[in-house]
């Protein structure tokens, strides 16, 4: 049985236009979405916390301002879902971890403030794999989210709640975070557009850190135009994030209708050939069909090589856990979250962490602590950082000949609960998405048909640093082609 | 465990040591499980050793940002009461913890 109703009450841009013109009120839009959440959330479990009262209050306030003639912004009255690792002042923020259960942040993330300033209305905090560590949302301390297209399969992860919320029609937009594919893979599994911006394009201030050199916030949307619109709202320099790129948001909506005539599209041979095992035939077929569609629209397609991409998983599973072990040291029972008793401070710290973290988080903290420990740092963390540098060189060389690259997003369609109980099997899900995080480049997953099981398949467009304009341009062409094929 | 200690990338003692460094208390069963699971990941990582990376500089910020600072101006910080309201234990406007040198 399907619970999929993407854009149940209109896309973000259509809602914003109607609310701005007075044709619809923000209050009525919010009520429609809250009713939809009431009807299906019990089975989907997209949320850790539904912000019904806050959303109704924000909508009422917005309607007063609109009635007074005020321009309330490009996302006027648009309900949005926030991944529950983004701080919302006074509203519970848990990272789907027992260690943060009941915590009310004393400040909001920059992206949360920017959405509100653009007229968007937060309707809930979405479930995730604990601290964003996972690819299925099965690692949540509060129970898994189910894929609205088939409740027996995972929505992907770690931003599974954010993806499921949009696929189920709970909100037309959501935000996720992507450290190794955590936006793009669930977007593929749930039939949505999902964007991982250039590292530094979107502020990480108020995003609870997992792998600080890899994490980026980005949108989920039901179409490319909505994804572009929300990107323009959340991107741009923020002095509260020292890794933020010092320039305004790129105008990624500007070339959505430009087509792809003359653009050069590369296919990374390691990602469609035999070098990486486990690519499902139906996913490969859809990727090939996407390449053919771009050729039909006037682009040229050729193969290229990123030899170190086959070591992406290895490098990632050193770097991300290493950074996580450092970032999660702050959860020690002192300033926030869970505290378990101990006779001295260290015993209290250890007892709190042991009781508060789930298995996957412990596994990654252990791995990262090991990779950074005396005698091993150079062999593991240092080597992985060199692999990233080498990979960045290879991408730079490839982008001398190509404008964008095309790959599968994930090796398969959404899998069943419990299908990847072995951690290494789960990690291999990220093989196509991880390289973009390692080198900091932008990437987008666009729905491109369905698999043999009828479940959605996404294809991925990669672009060079700050290359989001051409990335969205190609994504829009794929969207037109997929619509024509359906 | 089927493998002998010599074949393993990681020993039980390594795992127990790392758990102490990470301030985590693991059961014997967890140590057994993590020894195998973390060993699998390290084995994958060891494949990177086959790469000849010479003296290539390790990766930092993709756009090369360094030494980012803001003007040195006094600004409001987080509200003290709001911050302390979220702490497990507070005394006299401070976070309260058990004694540093209490009994084990």
Image (cartoon, rainbow, N blue to C red):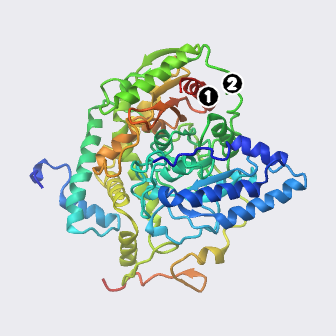
Asked whether, in this view, residue A313 is left or right of residue A33, the answer is left
Q: Earlier in the sequence, mark 2 or mark 1?
A: 2
- Residue B75 visible in the picture: no
Vertical side of A413 occupied by A296: above or below: above
Q: Which residue is mark 1?
A: A476
- Which residue position is annotated with label 2? A257
Q: Nearer the viewer, residue A167 or A280?
A: A167
* Secondary element at tag 1: helix
Instruction: State the residue lying farthest toward the front.
Output: A1
Q: Are marks 2 and 1 in contact (CB under 8 Å)?
A: yes
Residue at (41%, 32%) from the top-left corner? A451
Chain label for disc 2: A
Q: Is the residue B44 above or below the residue A175 in the image?
A: above
> What's the distance in space between the residues labelled 2 and 1, CA to CA?
7 Å
Residue A341 appears at what percent x and percent y?
Answer: 39, 82
Q: Tell me: A22 left or right of A136.
A: right
* Image x and y of residue A428, in percent: 34, 41
SS for dot 2: loop
Which percent across, then down, holds residue A130? 43, 58
At which x and y percent is residue A363?
Answer: 32, 57
Q: Residues within 10 Å of mark 2 (few under 14, many from 20)?
A: few
Query: Can residue B83 be seen here?
Result: yes
**In the image, is B44 to the left or to the right of A262?**
left
Residue B99 versus residue A88: which sits nearer the camera? A88
Q: A200 or A79, which is in the foreground?
A: A79
């Amino acid at each position: 049985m399907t619970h999929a109703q993407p854009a149940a009450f209109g896309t973000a841009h259509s809602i914003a236009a109607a609310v701005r013109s007075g044709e619809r009120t923000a209050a009525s839009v919010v009520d429609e979405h809250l009713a939809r959440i009431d009807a299906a959330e019990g089975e989907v479990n997209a949320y850790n916390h539904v912000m019904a009262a806050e959303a109704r209050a924000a909508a009422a306030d917005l309607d007063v301002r609109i009635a007074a003639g005020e321009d309330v912004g490009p996302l006027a009255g648009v309900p949005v879902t926030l991944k529950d690792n983004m701080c919302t002042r006074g509203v519970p923020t848990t990272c789907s971890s027992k260690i943060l259960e009941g915590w009310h942040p004393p400040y909001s993330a920059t992206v949360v403030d920017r959405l509100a300033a653009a007229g968007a209305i937060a309707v809930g905090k979405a479930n995730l794999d604990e601290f964003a560590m996972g690819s299925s949302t099965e690692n949540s301390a509060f129970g898994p989210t189910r894929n609205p297209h088939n409740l027996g399969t995972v929505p992907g992860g770690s931003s599974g709640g954010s993806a499921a919320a949009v696929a189920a029609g709970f909100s037309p937009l959501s935000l996720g975070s992507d450290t190794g594919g955590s936006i793009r893979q669930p977007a593929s599994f749930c039939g949505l557009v999902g964007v991982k911006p250039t590292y530094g394009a979107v502020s990480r201030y108020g995003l609870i850190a997992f792998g600080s050199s890899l994490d980026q916030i980005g949108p989920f949307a039901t179409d490319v135009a909505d994804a572009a619109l929300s990107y323009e709202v959340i991107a741009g320099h923020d002095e509260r994030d020292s890794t933020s790129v010092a320039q305004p948001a790129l105008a990624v909506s500007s070339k959505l209708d430009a087509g792809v005539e003359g653009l050069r599209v590369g296919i990374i041979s390691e990602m469609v050939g035999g070098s990486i095992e486990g690519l499902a035939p139906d996913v490969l077929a859809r990727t090939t069909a996407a390449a053919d569609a771009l050729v039909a629209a006037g682009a040229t397609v050729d193969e290229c090589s990123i030899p170190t991409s086959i070591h992406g998983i290895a490098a990632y599973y050193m770097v991300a856990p290493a950074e996580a072990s450092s970032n999660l040291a702050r959860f020690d029972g002192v300033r926030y979250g869970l505290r378990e008793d101990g006779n001295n401070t260290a015993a209290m710290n250890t007892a709190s962490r042991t009781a508060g973290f789930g298995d996957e988080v412990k596994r990654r903290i252990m791995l990262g602590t090991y990779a950074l420990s005396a005698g091993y740092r150079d062999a593991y963390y240092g080597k992985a950082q060199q692999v990233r540098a080498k990979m960045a060189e290879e991408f730079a060389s490839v982008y001398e000949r190509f404008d964008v690259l095309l790959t599968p997003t994930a090796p398969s369609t959404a899998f069943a609960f419990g299908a990847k109980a072995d951690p290494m099997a789960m990690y291999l899900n990220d093989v196509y998405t991880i390289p973009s995080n390692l080198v900091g480049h932008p990437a987008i997953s666009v729905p491109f048909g369905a698999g043999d099981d009828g479940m959605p398949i996404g294809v991925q467009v990669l672009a060079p640093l700050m290359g989001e304009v051409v990335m969205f341009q190609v994504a829009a062409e794929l969207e037109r082609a997929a619509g024509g094929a359906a | 465990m089927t493998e002998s200690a010599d074949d393993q990338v990681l020993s039980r003692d390594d795992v127990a040591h790392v758990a102490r460094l990470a301030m985590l208390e693991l059961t014997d069963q967890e140590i057994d499980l993590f020894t195998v699971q973390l060993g699998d990941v390290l084995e994958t990582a060891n494949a990177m050793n086959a790469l000849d990376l010479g003296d290539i500089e390790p990766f930092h910020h993709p756009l090369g940002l360094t030494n980012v600072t803001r003007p040195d101006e006094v600004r409001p910080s987080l509200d003290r009461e709001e911050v302390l309201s979220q702490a497990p234990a507070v005394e006299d406007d401070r976070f309260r913890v058990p004694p540093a040198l209490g009994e084990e």
